[in-house]
């Protein structure tokens, strides 16, 4: 029986429409190109800077060395920016996830008055904003400028994420809410003990989005801080490293082994590692969370 099933599967594979083959070939090429771009950064990070500058680096490192990473790890500003970004990402995930999930719960509650008015106000803010200058002036007035909280408070609520989470909440049986209400549980208790535990897939998905957004952001540092000890972030540090191409290694023991470009490649690889380590643990929830959260109405 298994042989017959295998033969049917193979025959079905070869009977695919030509458009399916075009799609598969396109996706394969796209995957190869995407992987090669990452691989090119990797081989640049492990290449001798002088040899890399001479060209001819395509598939394997040229003059394999760890010097680029050693220069990065010896730079105190790198560790400061890394610490700030880790702290910003952790605090940002917790703050935005809890606040957004709480608003999403309120938007699904049958007891909330003027729900449609709130909804359209939220939608309006997705498409229109005051702009960078008013935001800058507002942060100055509120005392958020050049503080760590300028990264957390303005992004503590996302309308898009709220819609995704609230749509997921609508799929939770209302009988659970009614049973808890009959037992005397308040709204916060119902949200924390029933809705949040049942929403792990969508919460994991949204948490990943929030983490990537905080981890990759540098505009906030550039516009609303002076990039001091407690406000410089990793991506802003890498931006300076790449754009300025300043002689990071000038006068050091690695001056013959590294260049600004290979050092920036090493910094990019180091910045990628934490997200790449976290993603496999969240991936199993990702598809379910985004599909259920976006389709339920």
Image (cartoon, grey):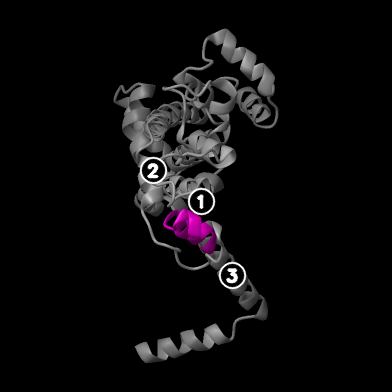
Q: How many marks?
A: 3
Q: Earlier in the sequence, mark 2 or mark 1?
A: 2
Q: How busy is the neighbourhood of tag 3: few (under 14 within 10 Å), some, or many (20 plus)?
A: few
Kindly report the secondary structure that dominates the magenta region of the rendered protein. helix
Residue under the point 46% across and 24% down: 231
Q: Earlier in the sequence, mark 3 or mark 2?
A: 3
Q: Quadrant of residue 90?
A: top left
- Asked if residue 38 lies in the magenta stretch, the reply is yes
Which residue is tagged 3? 29
Q: Nearer the viewer, mark 1 or mark 3?
A: 3
Tell me where residue 82 appears, x and y as whole percent. 39, 35
Q: How busy is the neighbourhood of tag 1: few (under 14 within 10 Å), some, or many (20 plus)?
A: some
Of helix, strand and loop, which one carries label 3?
A: helix
24 is higher (above) or lower (below) than 183: below
Tell me where residue 116 appears, x and y as whole percent. 63, 26
Which residue is tagged 2? 71
The front one of 41 and 188 is 41
Looking at the rendering, the stretch of residues picked out in magenta corresponds to: 36-52
Q: CA distance from mark 3 to mark 2?
A: 35 Å
Q: Position of 153 compared to 253: left or right? A: right
The front one of 215 and 7 is 215
Tell me where residue 213 appears, x and y as whole percent. 51, 38
Quarter occupied by the N terminus: bottom left
Which residue is tagged 1? 291
Q: How busy is the neighbourhood of tag 2: few (under 14 within 10 Å), some, or many (20 plus)?
A: many
Q: Name, please, the residue furthest toward the left.
A: 183
Tell me where residue 293 appears, x and y as whole percent. 50, 44
Q: CA distance from mark 2 to mark 1?
A: 44 Å
Of helix, strand and loop, which one carries label 2?
A: helix
Of helix, strand and loop, which one carries label 1?
A: helix
- Asked if residue 265 lies in the magenta stretch, the reply is no
């Amino acid at each position: 029986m298994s042989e017959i099933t295998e033969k049917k599967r193979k025959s079905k594979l070869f009977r695919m429409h030509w458009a399916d083959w075009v799609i598969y070939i396109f996706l394969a090429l796209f995957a190869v190109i995407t992987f090669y771009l990452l691989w090119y950064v990797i081989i640049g990070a492990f290449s001798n800077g002088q040899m890399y500058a001479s060209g001819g680096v395509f598939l394997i490192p040229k003059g394999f060395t760890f010097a680029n990473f050693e220069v990065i790890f010896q730079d105190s500003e790198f560790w400061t920016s890394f610490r700030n970004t880790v702290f910003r990402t952790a605090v940002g995930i917790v703050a935005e996830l809890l606040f957004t999930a709480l608003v999403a719960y309120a938007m699904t509650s049958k007891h909330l008055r003027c729900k449609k008015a709130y909804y359209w106000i939220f939608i309006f803010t997705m498409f229109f904003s005051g702009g960078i200058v008013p935001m800058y002036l507002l942060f100055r007035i509120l005392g958020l400028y050049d503080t760590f909280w300028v990264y957390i408070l303005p992004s503590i609520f996302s309308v898009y994420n709220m819609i995704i989470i609230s749509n997921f909440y609508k799929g939770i049986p209302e009988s659970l809410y009614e049973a808890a209400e009959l037992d005397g549980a308040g709204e916060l208790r119902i949200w924390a003990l029933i809705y949040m535990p049942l929403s792990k897939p969508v919460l994991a998905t949204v948490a990943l989005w929030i983490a990537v957004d905080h981890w990759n952001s540098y505009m906030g540092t550039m516009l609303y801080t002076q990039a001091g000890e407690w406000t410089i972030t990793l991506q802003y540090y890498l931006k300076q490293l790449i754009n300025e191409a300043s002689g990071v290694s000038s006068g050091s023991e690695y001056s013959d082994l590294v260049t600004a470009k290979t050092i920036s490649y090493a910094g990019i690889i180091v910045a990628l590692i934490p997200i790449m380590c976290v993603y496999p643990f969240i991936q199993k929830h990702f598809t379910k969370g985004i599909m259920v959260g976006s389709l339920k109405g």
